[in-house]
Amino acid sequence: MSGFHRGAYRLPFSGTIPRHEPFSLDEFAERKSRRVLRLKKGDLVWLLDSTGVYRKCICLGFNQKRRLRFQATAEVVPGREPSPLLLALPPIRDAGFETLLRQTSEIGIEKVQCIRTRFSRTPKPAGETKISRWNRLLLSSALQSGRSRPVALDVNPITLPELLERETERTVVVLDSTGSPFSDSTEFRQNLSFPLLVLLGPEGGWSDEEREFFKKRNLFLFSLGDTTLKTDTAAVSSCFFLLRILNS
Protein backbone atom coordinates (compact mmCIF):
# COMPACT_ATOMS: atom_id res chain seq x y z
CA MET A 1 0.00 0.00 0.00
CA SER A 2 1.32 3.47 -0.87
CA GLY A 3 0.02 7.02 -0.74
CA PHE A 4 -1.31 9.24 -3.50
CA HIS A 5 1.21 10.70 -5.87
CA ARG A 6 1.11 14.40 -6.63
CA GLY A 7 -1.75 15.32 -8.97
CA ALA A 8 -3.48 11.92 -8.65
CA TYR A 9 -6.99 11.79 -10.11
CA ARG A 10 -9.71 10.91 -7.58
CA LEU A 11 -13.35 10.08 -8.26
CA PRO A 12 -16.29 8.73 -6.21
CA PHE A 13 -17.75 5.27 -6.75
CA SER A 14 -21.21 4.36 -5.46
CA GLY A 15 -21.00 0.96 -3.81
CA THR A 16 -18.13 -1.53 -3.67
CA ILE A 17 -15.62 -1.53 -6.51
CA PRO A 18 -15.60 -4.84 -8.49
CA ARG A 19 -12.24 -6.54 -8.11
CA HIS A 20 -12.11 -8.94 -11.04
CA GLU A 21 -14.21 -7.49 -13.84
CA PRO A 22 -14.39 -4.17 -15.75
CA PHE A 23 -16.97 -1.64 -14.63
CA SER A 24 -18.39 1.82 -15.41
CA LEU A 25 -18.98 4.86 -13.20
CA ASP A 26 -22.22 6.56 -12.24
CA GLU A 27 -23.43 9.60 -14.16
CA PHE A 28 -21.71 12.23 -11.97
CA ALA A 29 -18.31 10.50 -11.96
CA GLU A 30 -18.59 9.61 -15.65
CA ARG A 31 -19.24 13.23 -16.57
CA LYS A 32 -16.32 14.48 -14.48
CA SER A 33 -13.94 11.83 -15.83
CA ARG A 34 -14.75 12.81 -19.42
CA ARG A 35 -15.34 16.58 -19.30
CA VAL A 36 -13.04 17.65 -16.47
CA LEU A 37 -10.29 15.05 -16.15
CA ARG A 38 -10.49 13.98 -19.82
CA LEU A 39 -9.40 10.46 -18.97
CA LYS A 40 -8.20 8.18 -21.73
CA LYS A 41 -7.10 4.57 -22.09
CA GLY A 42 -4.20 3.77 -19.79
CA ASP A 43 -4.81 6.62 -17.30
CA LEU A 44 -4.74 5.76 -13.60
CA VAL A 45 -7.38 7.02 -11.17
CA TRP A 46 -8.17 6.50 -7.48
CA LEU A 47 -11.82 5.63 -6.82
CA LEU A 48 -13.41 6.18 -3.39
CA ASP A 49 -15.94 3.45 -2.60
CA SER A 50 -18.67 3.29 0.05
CA THR A 51 -16.28 1.77 2.62
CA GLY A 52 -14.06 4.87 2.69
CA VAL A 53 -11.17 3.24 0.82
CA TYR A 54 -9.46 4.54 -2.33
CA ARG A 55 -8.52 1.88 -4.90
CA LYS A 56 -6.21 2.50 -7.82
CA CYS A 57 -7.93 1.67 -11.13
CA ILE A 58 -6.85 1.81 -14.76
CA CYS A 59 -8.98 3.31 -17.51
CA LEU A 60 -9.68 0.78 -20.28
CA GLY A 61 -11.15 3.29 -22.71
CA PHE A 62 -14.69 3.39 -24.11
CA ASN A 63 -17.06 0.48 -24.57
CA GLN A 64 -19.60 0.16 -27.42
CA LYS A 65 -22.02 2.47 -25.55
CA ARG A 66 -19.34 5.17 -25.31
CA ARG A 67 -19.00 4.74 -21.53
CA LEU A 68 -15.56 4.68 -19.96
CA ARG A 69 -14.61 1.32 -18.48
CA PHE A 70 -12.21 0.73 -15.59
CA GLN A 71 -10.34 -2.20 -14.07
CA ALA A 72 -9.38 -2.30 -10.39
CA THR A 73 -5.81 -3.00 -9.26
CA ALA A 74 -4.68 -4.45 -5.92
CA GLU A 75 -3.36 -1.11 -4.62
CA VAL A 76 -5.51 0.61 -1.99
CA VAL A 77 -5.19 3.64 0.32
CA PRO A 78 -7.52 4.18 3.31
CA GLY A 79 -9.22 7.58 3.22
CA ARG A 80 -8.49 10.03 6.02
CA GLU A 81 -11.29 9.93 8.58
CA PRO A 82 -12.96 13.25 9.43
CA SER A 83 -12.55 14.56 12.96
CA PRO A 84 -15.67 14.19 15.16
CA LEU A 85 -16.50 17.89 15.14
CA LEU A 86 -20.02 19.16 14.47
CA LEU A 87 -20.30 22.82 13.44
CA ALA A 88 -23.69 24.41 14.14
CA LEU A 89 -24.50 27.86 12.82
CA PRO A 90 -27.44 29.90 11.45
CA PRO A 91 -28.04 29.99 7.68
CA ILE A 92 -25.81 32.48 5.82
CA ARG A 93 -25.75 33.76 2.26
CA ASP A 94 -24.98 31.25 -0.47
CA ALA A 95 -21.53 32.55 -1.47
CA GLY A 96 -20.23 32.54 2.09
CA PHE A 97 -21.91 29.22 2.82
CA GLU A 98 -20.26 27.51 -0.13
CA THR A 99 -16.86 28.87 0.95
CA LEU A 100 -17.54 27.53 4.45
CA LEU A 101 -18.53 24.09 3.14
CA ARG A 102 -15.48 23.82 0.91
CA GLN A 103 -12.98 24.84 3.56
CA THR A 104 -14.44 22.90 6.49
CA SER A 105 -14.48 19.83 4.25
CA GLU A 106 -10.79 20.32 3.48
CA ILE A 107 -10.05 20.77 7.20
CA GLY A 108 -11.90 17.52 7.85
CA ILE A 109 -14.87 18.07 10.18
CA GLU A 110 -17.74 15.62 10.53
CA LYS A 111 -20.93 17.65 10.00
CA VAL A 112 -22.47 21.08 9.41
CA GLN A 113 -25.86 21.70 11.02
CA CYS A 114 -27.97 24.83 10.55
CA ILE A 115 -29.65 26.24 13.65
CA ARG A 116 -32.34 28.81 14.37
CA THR A 117 -31.41 31.67 16.71
CA ARG A 118 -32.98 34.91 17.88
CA PHE A 119 -31.16 37.15 15.39
CA SER A 120 -30.56 34.71 12.53
CA ARG A 121 -31.97 35.45 9.11
CA THR A 122 -34.77 33.30 7.75
CA PRO A 123 -33.87 32.37 4.17
CA LYS A 124 -36.08 30.55 1.72
CA PRO A 125 -35.85 26.76 2.10
CA ALA A 126 -33.04 25.39 -0.06
CA GLY A 127 -34.36 23.49 -3.08
CA GLU A 128 -33.17 20.11 -4.26
CA THR A 129 -30.99 21.66 -6.97
CA LYS A 130 -29.11 23.83 -4.48
CA ILE A 131 -28.68 21.03 -1.93
CA SER A 132 -27.45 18.72 -4.69
CA ARG A 133 -24.86 21.34 -5.72
CA TRP A 134 -23.68 21.73 -2.11
CA ASN A 135 -23.33 17.96 -1.69
CA ARG A 136 -21.32 17.73 -4.93
CA LEU A 137 -19.09 20.52 -3.63
CA LEU A 138 -18.57 18.63 -0.36
CA LEU A 139 -17.79 15.42 -2.23
CA SER A 140 -15.28 17.14 -4.52
CA SER A 141 -13.56 18.78 -1.52
CA ALA A 142 -13.40 15.45 0.31
CA LEU A 143 -11.82 13.77 -2.72
CA GLN A 144 -9.31 16.57 -3.12
CA SER A 145 -8.30 16.15 0.53
CA GLY A 146 -8.21 12.35 0.45
CA ARG A 147 -11.05 12.05 2.99
CA SER A 148 -12.93 8.81 3.51
CA ARG A 149 -16.30 10.57 3.18
CA PRO A 150 -17.68 14.08 2.67
CA VAL A 151 -18.96 16.33 5.44
CA ALA A 152 -22.56 15.54 6.39
CA LEU A 153 -24.89 18.49 5.79
CA ASP A 154 -28.26 19.33 7.36
CA VAL A 155 -29.68 22.67 6.17
CA ASN A 156 -32.99 22.34 8.02
CA PRO A 157 -32.56 24.74 10.99
CA ILE A 158 -33.27 23.38 14.46
CA THR A 159 -33.38 25.21 17.80
CA LEU A 160 -30.56 25.27 20.32
CA PRO A 161 -32.49 23.12 22.86
CA GLU A 162 -33.22 20.55 20.15
CA LEU A 163 -29.56 20.42 19.14
CA LEU A 164 -28.17 20.12 22.66
CA GLU A 165 -30.76 17.49 23.56
CA ARG A 166 -29.62 15.43 20.59
CA GLU A 167 -25.86 15.91 21.00
CA THR A 168 -25.47 15.09 24.69
CA GLU A 169 -22.16 13.25 24.26
CA ARG A 170 -20.27 16.17 22.73
CA THR A 171 -18.07 18.75 24.40
CA VAL A 172 -19.72 22.11 23.60
CA VAL A 173 -17.80 25.23 22.58
CA VAL A 174 -19.77 28.47 22.14
CA LEU A 175 -18.18 31.19 20.01
CA ASP A 176 -19.17 34.72 21.02
CA SER A 177 -17.55 38.14 20.78
CA THR A 178 -18.10 38.72 24.52
CA GLY A 179 -16.38 35.48 25.50
CA SER A 180 -12.87 34.92 26.79
CA PRO A 181 -10.10 34.46 24.21
CA PHE A 182 -9.07 30.84 23.70
CA SER A 183 -5.49 31.64 24.63
CA ASP A 184 -6.53 32.93 28.08
CA SER A 185 -8.13 29.68 29.24
CA THR A 186 -5.62 26.95 30.06
CA GLU A 187 -8.28 24.90 31.86
CA PHE A 188 -10.52 24.93 28.80
CA ARG A 189 -7.72 23.81 26.50
CA GLN A 190 -6.81 20.97 28.89
CA ASN A 191 -10.41 19.73 29.14
CA LEU A 192 -11.17 20.00 25.43
CA SER A 193 -11.96 16.59 23.93
CA PHE A 194 -13.72 14.80 21.07
CA PRO A 195 -16.50 14.52 20.04
CA LEU A 196 -16.97 18.28 19.76
CA LEU A 197 -19.88 20.63 19.07
CA VAL A 198 -19.03 24.18 18.00
CA LEU A 199 -21.86 26.72 18.25
CA LEU A 200 -21.51 29.86 16.17
CA GLY A 201 -24.04 32.67 16.39
CA PRO A 202 -25.34 35.00 13.66
CA GLU A 203 -23.52 38.18 12.65
CA GLY A 204 -25.83 40.05 15.05
CA GLY A 205 -24.53 37.91 17.91
CA TRP A 206 -26.33 35.85 20.52
CA SER A 207 -29.29 37.37 22.34
CA ASP A 208 -29.29 37.93 26.13
CA GLU A 209 -31.78 35.06 26.46
CA GLU A 210 -29.45 32.72 24.54
CA ARG A 211 -26.46 33.72 26.66
CA GLU A 212 -28.54 33.03 29.78
CA PHE A 213 -29.47 29.66 28.26
CA PHE A 214 -25.77 28.83 27.84
CA LYS A 215 -25.05 29.96 31.40
CA LYS A 216 -27.74 27.68 32.86
CA ARG A 217 -26.15 24.74 31.03
CA ASN A 218 -22.69 25.69 32.33
CA LEU A 219 -21.42 26.38 28.82
CA PHE A 220 -18.60 28.88 28.59
CA LEU A 221 -18.30 31.48 25.84
CA PHE A 222 -15.04 31.96 23.98
CA SER A 223 -13.89 34.35 21.28
CA LEU A 224 -11.29 34.45 18.54
CA GLY A 225 -10.06 37.84 19.74
CA ASP A 226 -10.94 41.45 19.00
CA THR A 227 -11.08 41.11 15.22
CA THR A 228 -14.57 41.19 13.68
CA LEU A 229 -14.92 38.29 11.25
CA LYS A 230 -17.58 37.24 8.79
CA THR A 231 -19.53 34.15 9.81
CA ASP A 232 -17.86 31.83 7.29
CA THR A 233 -14.37 33.10 8.23
CA ALA A 234 -15.07 32.73 11.95
CA ALA A 235 -16.43 29.21 11.41
CA VAL A 236 -13.42 27.99 9.46
CA SER A 237 -10.93 29.71 11.80
CA SER A 238 -12.50 28.27 14.95
CA CYS A 239 -12.66 24.73 13.52
CA PHE A 240 -9.04 24.89 12.39
CA PHE A 241 -7.90 26.27 15.75
CA LEU A 242 -9.78 23.66 17.80
CA LEU A 243 -8.64 20.75 15.64
CA ARG A 244 -5.07 21.93 15.87
CA ILE A 245 -5.29 21.86 19.68
CA LEU A 246 -6.97 18.46 19.81
CA ASN A 247 -4.72 16.80 17.23
CA SER A 248 -1.44 18.10 18.61
Image (cartoon, grey):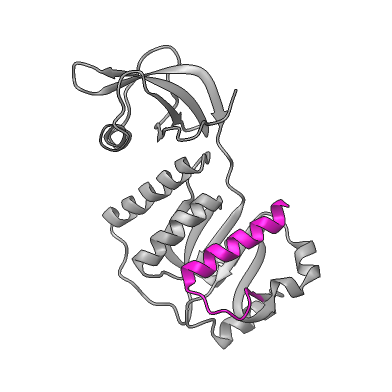
Q: Is residue 244 above or below residue 79?
A: below
Decide if residue 32 is in sight here.
Answer: yes
List x then y, in percent, for residue 162: 54, 67
List x then y, in percent, for residue 8: 45, 32
- Residue 170, by quadrant, is bottom right
Question: Residue at (51%, 50%) from the top-left corner?
Answer: 106
Decide if residue 110 is in sight here.
Answer: no
What stretch of residues is rendered in magenta?
222-248
Q: Is residue 34 above or below residue 245?
A: above
The residue most toward the bottom is 208
Query: In the rendered structure, does residue 226 fall within the stretch colored magenta?
Result: yes
List x then y, in percent, for residue 82: 58, 46
> In this image, 152 relative to 197: left or right?
left
Q: Is residue 29 above or below residue 165?
A: above
- Assign the magenta stretch its main secondary structure: helix
> In this image, 71 relative to 51: left or right?
left
- Residue 127, by quadrant, is bottom left
Q: Is residue 184 above or below residue 53?
A: below
